[in-house]
Image (cartoon, rainbow, N blue to C red):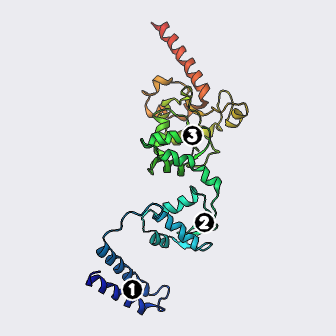
Amino acid sequence: MSDDAAENLRDAAKRLSEMAGALRPGDTSREALDDVIADLRITAVRRFGPRTAARSGDGGKGKILAYLVAHLGEWVHGEELAAVSGIGEWARRTREWRTQEGYDIDEEAGSYRLNSVMPDTDTAEAWQIPNEIRRRPGSAPTRLLALLQAYEGQVVTTEKLVYVAKIPSAPRRVRELRDEDGWPIESHIDDPDLQPGQYRLISSDPKDRRDVRQRLYPEDLRERVFARDDYKCQKCGRDRERAEKAGDRRFYLEVHHKKAVAEELDALPAEELNDEANLITYCHRDHIEETARLQKRRRSERAAEA
């Protein structure tokens, strides 16, 4: 060790010794202690260089769990976990122990408490599929679609979507899969039984793809129309509960324009397109049938005019 480094350590040790037993919550000695800690970190960097990547099994995430186990049943402030782990993503890694590994960890006001050293195996198993998909190569939308397909017909949370996509904008990417590619993906706007942040892919079958012109209707407009119509198809009278009881698990809702047919919607001015009095709730099956019927009628009318 260089003379300067040795002198810095001796000085820090002297200052710490003088502080011992004199620290009081809320007084200025906390600031003095932080200064000593900062000096020690600077000395470590100058003497040994920047921190190197952790060895396998010895990373910051493992240190977090070890610290929580050592303080089992106690509230531990997040700053403690940041200090012991030495990583900037300590909060996310702590949540991973809870959500992906199944550890019973409470979180409140920036503090954490581990209640048991034994993880919940059911919770851990529930994350096996997201973990496998997360490791796949390819784009975020590709992994998101793979996750939704793996849980087809089941609820998928934003937490799992963000984890698999590796980007915080995962919900927006899911909406793009719905609006641009036509995947029949429901949210709380389509089904009041879903909570905000929950999504469900109804079907992977190409025949069940959503009408991509549904993207023309803003989210808040769709929500108002569906709520006004009590989330029921106004042609067959079914809602999701009735459809599922009848064995139809591919039921989902779409906005139907009473006057215009599909190919005419793009040309409509916004005020006419979004006129709620001219919009009605149909299930996907009846929407297809009604659109086909209107298109046939329009062809007949044009032929008669020719």
Q: Amino acid at mark 2?
A: Asp
Disc 1: which residue: 32
Question: In the shown orientation, is residue 152 left or right of residue 179?
Answer: right
Disc 3: which residue: 150
- N-terminal of the two: label 1 or label 3? 1
* Contact (Cβ within 8 Å) of mark 1 with mark 2: no
Question: In the shown orientation, is residue 271 left or right of residue 248?
Answer: left
Mark 3 residue crowding within 10 angstroms, few (<14) / some (14–19) / many (20+): some
Taking depth in this image into account, of 299 and 14 the one nearest to the observer is 14
Q: CA distance from mark 1 to mark 2?
A: 32 Å
Image: 284 above or below 78: above
Image: 160 above or below 33: above
Residue lying at the far right in this picture: please name it.
Answer: 245
Q: CA distance from mark 2 to mark 3?
A: 29 Å
Residue 67 at x, y percent in the picture: 53, 71
Query: In which quadrant is the C terminus drawn?
Result: top left
Image: 34 above or below 170: below
Image: 174 above or below 28: above
Residue 30 at x, y percent in the picture: 43, 84
- N-terminal of the two: label 2 or label 3? 2
| Mark linked to residue 106 | 2
Taking depth in this image into account, of 28 and 22 the one nearest to the observer is 22
Residue 246 at x, y percent in the picture: 72, 30
Q: Amino acid at mark 3?
A: Ala
Q: CA distance from mark 1 to mark 3?
A: 54 Å
